[in-house]
Amino acid sequence: MKRLIFLLLMISQSTMANCWDNAAHYYHVDPWLLFAIAKVESGMNPYAVGWNHDGSRDVGLMQINSSHFSELQRLGIDESRLITEPCTSIMVGASILSGMVKVYGYNWEAVGAYNAGAKKENYPQRMMYAHKVWAKYREIKAKQSYRY
């Protein structure tokens, strides 16, 4: 039984690794950056739901904001899938980040816009968020370097 549980855990982790890599490859972003965003956004909790001051909410591993729900619904992705399918959340998060990269270029302001949006007045929030992700990204990359 212990071997079966271990095998299932390994398969699960392998599947998740493929999710990060597939999303990153498809949207041309760094998989470790996506991972860092998820660590900052949800603490890697796929069931996380956060409520915002403006009445919107963020759901799932990548904390997809409800402002995206109507567009996602047209693609067959509902709130439940974002919570119960971490790979779907990762793919949607990568898509959102990719959209911000198209606006700002591949830089930290684009990362900040993932969370704070593109409004000009949100620049300070973008930079604060980007700094959090940058710190988490450096931590993750340092651990990866240590392994090799």
Image (cartoon, rainbow, N blue to C red):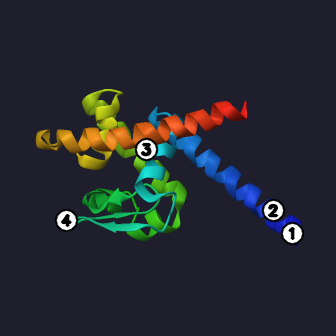
Q: Which residue is mark 1?
A: 2
Amino acid type shown at disc 4: His
Is label 4 or label 3 in front? 4
Label drawn at residue 53: 4
Q: Is residue 109 above or below residue 91?
A: above
Q: Position of residue 39 (x, y in %)?
A: 48, 51
Q: CA separation, marks 4 and 3?
A: 24 Å
Evaluate if marks 4 and 3 touch, with contact meaning CB atoms under 8 Å apart. Answer: no
First in residue order: circle 4 vs circle 2: 2
The numbered mark at residue 6 is: 2
How many residues crowd around disc 4 within 10 Å: few (fewer than 14), some, or many (20 or more)?
A: few
Label 3 Cα neighbours within 10 Å, binned few <14 / some 14-19 / many ≥20: many
**In the image, what residue occupies the spot 53% across and 59% down?**
86
Mark 1, Cα crowd under 10 Å, few <14 / some 14-19 / many 20+, is: few
Q: Residue at x 76, y 55 (%)?
A: 10
Report how far apart the C-alphas of labels 3 and 2 lie in the structure: 29 Å
Q: Quadrant of residue 130?
A: top left
- The reply to whether residue 85 is in sight is yes
The residue that disc 3 covers is 94
Q: Is 46 placed left or right of 50 in the picture?
A: right
Labels 1 & 2 near each other (Cβ < 8 A): yes
Residue type marked 3:
Ala
